[in-house]
Image: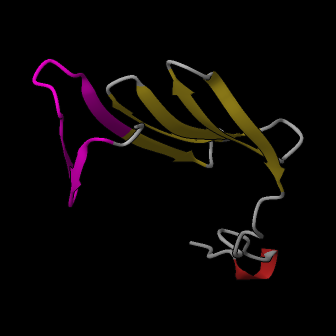
Amino acid sequence: MLWSKTLSQNYYVPVQENELAYEFHYNINDLLSGVVTHRWESKYGDYVRGSYSFLEPNGMIRNVNYVVDGKRGYRAITKFLKPPQMSKINTLQPSEVPTK
């Protein structure tokens, strides 16, 4: 059985004492440099699942969700998403720019 493990709240209790388990995530949203990405991954025994996304040069967001298990290998689904419209940040009109 794939999930013969105990999941409780936000932590994982391995069934076997020597079974490897981890989880991590991070986000980078640096609009000045154009680096916008996220990544997360969790591993429980032989089963890994995760997701990552990044902003493509053409402005689309590439989103990849993946699963890895010992029997079926690596499987991924990739989607390209149009980014949500940004609110008007730092878009002052010339007449609104403060002067000294």
Residue pushed farthest front? Answer: 1
Identify the residue at horizontal 67%, vertical 29% (top origin): 75
Q: Position of residue 25 (x, y in %)?
A: 39, 41
Q: Nearer the viewer, residue 74 or 35?
A: 74
**74 is higher (above) or lower (below) than 8:** above
Identify the residue at horizontal 26%, vertical 42% (top origin): 5
- Quarter of the image that includes the C terminus: bottom right
Does 51 sit left or right of 9 as displayed? right
Does 56 sit left or right of 72 as displayed? right
Q: Nearer the viewer, residue 20 or 95?
A: 20
Residue pushed farthest bottom? Answer: 96
**84 is higher (above) or lower (below) than 29:** below
Q: Position of residue 38 (x, y in %)?
A: 54, 43
Q: Position of residue 84 (x, y in %)?
A: 75, 67
**94 is higher (above) or lower (below) than 72:** below
Residue 74 magenta? no
- Image quadrant assignment for residue 91: bottom right
Q: Position of residue 9 (x, y in %)?
A: 20, 61
Q: Nearer the viewer, residue 13 or 88?
A: 13
Residue 15 magenta? yes
Identify the residue at horizontal 62%, vertical 73% (top origin): 99
- Image quadrant assignment for residue 14: top left
Identify the residue at horizontal 66%, vertical 68% (top origin): 90
User: Magenta residues?
Assistant: 4-24
Does 25 sit left or right of 74 as displayed? left
